[in-house]
């Protein structure tokens, strides 16, 4: 049936990733088609973090926490835009009622010696594959240090507006 529907519509598409995580959360994100291809490669690998861009945020998903994922599409222009993300959002691996997450404020990244800034560097470290037990950190909007145990992170979402200017999904090459 899907093949028939796919053949009936050959126009532009909007792609979505709908996850079911081990902690019971079920986040969904709009993405580009290239992210769906990279996700298949990440799932075949089975470990680490899969990092991709949604329209207003960069998302890192712990592949080991994915119970199921659906790759969905709609004809272009038929989807309602999601509410814009204002703060950093972290879901942890422990089960949480009602898809809870923690939110953190942060100032926009300043380029560092790598050109990524603190938040871009954190996402890059996740994508490269943190060491077991490794803590990653960033400064929040008050200048206070937030430290996250990478093994305990199911997802992290960072508003694109907080990342260093020019550091976009197509400039990243780690996931393919």
Image (cartoon, helix red, strand yellow):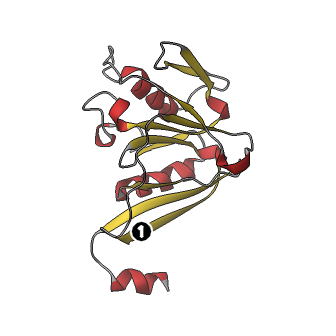
Q: Which residue is mark 1?
A: 73
The answer to which image quadrant residue 37 occupies is bottom left
Q: Residue at 40%, 42% (x, y): give it.
A: 57
Q: Position of residue 62 (x, y in %)?
A: 59, 41
How many numbered marks are there? 1
Q: Residue at 59%, 45% (x, y): give it.
A: 63
Q: Is residue 54 above or below residue 86?
A: below
> In this view of the protein, can residue 166 be seen by the observer?
yes
Q: Position of residue 23 (x, y in %)?
A: 71, 47
Q: Residue at 42%, 54% (x, y): give it.
A: 82
Q: Is residue 93 left or right of residue 35?
A: right
Q: Residues within 10 Å of mark 1 (few under 14, many from 20)?
A: some
Q: Is residue 126 above or below residue 82?
A: above
Q: Quadrant of the C terminus?
A: top left
Q: Position of residue 110 (x, y in %)?
A: 32, 18
Q: Residue at 53%, 13% (x, y): give it.
A: 144
Element type where label 1 sits in the image: strand
Q: Is residue 176 left or right of residue 62?
A: left
> In this view of the protein, can residue 22 be seen by the observer?
no
The answer to which image quadrant residue 132 occupies is top right
Q: Is residue 1 left or right of residue 110?
A: right
Q: Position of residue 134 (x, y in %)?
A: 62, 22
Q: Nearer the viewer, residue 140 or 127?
A: 140
């Amino acid at each position: 049936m899907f093949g028939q529907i796919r053949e009936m519509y050959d126009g532009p598409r909007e792609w979505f990733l709908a996850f079911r995580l081990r902690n019971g959360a079920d986040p969904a994100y709009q993405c580009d088609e290239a992210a769906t291809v990279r996700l298949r490669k990440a799932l075949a690998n089975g470990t680490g973090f899969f990092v991709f861009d949604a329209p207003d945020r960069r998302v890192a998903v712990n592949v080991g926490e994915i119970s199921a994922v659906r790759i969905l599409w709609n004809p272009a222009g038929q989807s309602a835009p999601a509410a814009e993300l204002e703060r950093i959002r972290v879901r942890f691996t422990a089960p949480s009622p009602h898809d809870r997450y923690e939110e953190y404020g942060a100032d926009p990244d300043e380029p560092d010696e790598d050109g990524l800034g603190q938040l871009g560097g954190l996402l890059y470290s996740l994508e490269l594959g943190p060491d077991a037990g490794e803590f990653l950190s960033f400064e929040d909007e008050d200048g206070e240090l937030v430290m996250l145990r990478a093994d305990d992170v199911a997802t992290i979402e960072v508003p694109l507006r907080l990342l260093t200017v020019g550091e976009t999904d197509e400039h990243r090459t780690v996931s393919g």
